[in-house]
Image (spheres, rainbow, N blue to C red):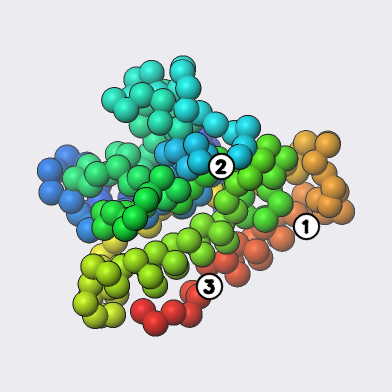
Amino acid sequence: MKHREVGDSYNVPLNIYNSWNSDSPAAPALYIFGDSLFNSGNNNFLPTLSKANFPPYGVDFNGGATGRFTNRKIFPDLFLGLPYSPPYLSIRGSPELTGLNFAPASSGILPETGNSTGKCLNFVEQIDLFNHTVELELPKHYKTSSEVSNYLSKSVFVITIGSNDYLDYIKPQLLTPKRRYDPQSFAKRLIEDLSQQFQVRPHKY
């Protein structure tokens, strides 16, 4: 199996790729999950040391230091034709129909990952917040469950997760309870946990 290296290109559906050079969106919404690579500001609203809402972060970004762990755009920002998906935790009232960003910094597949720096939303919690949006917020904008299903089926979902699990794994002060895993066993646990998290959770849509 070929492992992706830094600088490798992403495999992006052709219609999404074409939207980068188009003013019309290729999808009704963009939903983002993951960690600091995709975080757009959720950590601004969490009690954590993992924050990026100050310079030099954002020095080349039109919105300044928004919480993105970069000087400019994150990868999901490149989906032209759609507004930037706002951080979920920044929303007061009904969320945007063009998407939401659930990704915080420090999060991982395992629930304990990232907790050494403060509160973070692990992947399961991000999925639960998305399900909350689907079940309680989207019906306010769509009259029938079929309309909600149609909207979701045409939306784009992007995910990056797992790097912080390995960062915690190699830190000596954080190896409990991870110490009982050798590298192969730890990788297997991450795969098994992530596979379970990807299982469709039952809801009426």
Mark 3–mark 2 CB contact (< 8 Å)? no
Dividing the image into 4 quarters, which one contains the C terminus?
A: bottom left
Q: Which of marks 1 and 2 is in front?
A: 2
- Front-most of residues 19 and 66: 66
* Residue at the image point whose x is 24% and y is 44% from the top: 83
Q: Mark 1 points at which residue?
A: 185
* Residue at the image point whose x is 78% and y is 36% from the top: 171
Q: Nearer the viewer, mark 3 or mark 1?
A: 3
Residue type at tag 3: Gln
Q: What element carries label 1?
A: helix
Label 1 – label 2 distance at C-alpha: 32 Å
Q: Where is residue 91 in the image (x, y as percent from the top left)?
A: 38, 49
Q: Position of residue 109 (x, y in %)?
A: 62, 55
Q: Mark 1 or mark 3, which is nearer the start of the sequence? A: 1
The quadrant holding residue 67 is top left
Q: In this view, does 4 lie to the left or right of 78?
A: right
Q: Mark 3 points at which residue?
A: 199
Q: Where is residue 178 in the image (x, y as percent from the top left)?
A: 81, 50
Q: Position of residue 189 (x, y in %)?
A: 71, 60
Q: Name the residue under label 2.
A: 46
The quadrant holding residue 75 is top left
Which circle marks residue 18 in the picture? none
Neighbour tally class for label 2: few under 14, some 14-19, many 20 plus, Cα within 10 Å: some
Which residue sits furthest right? 180
* Residue at the image point whose x is 13% and y is 49% from the top: 24
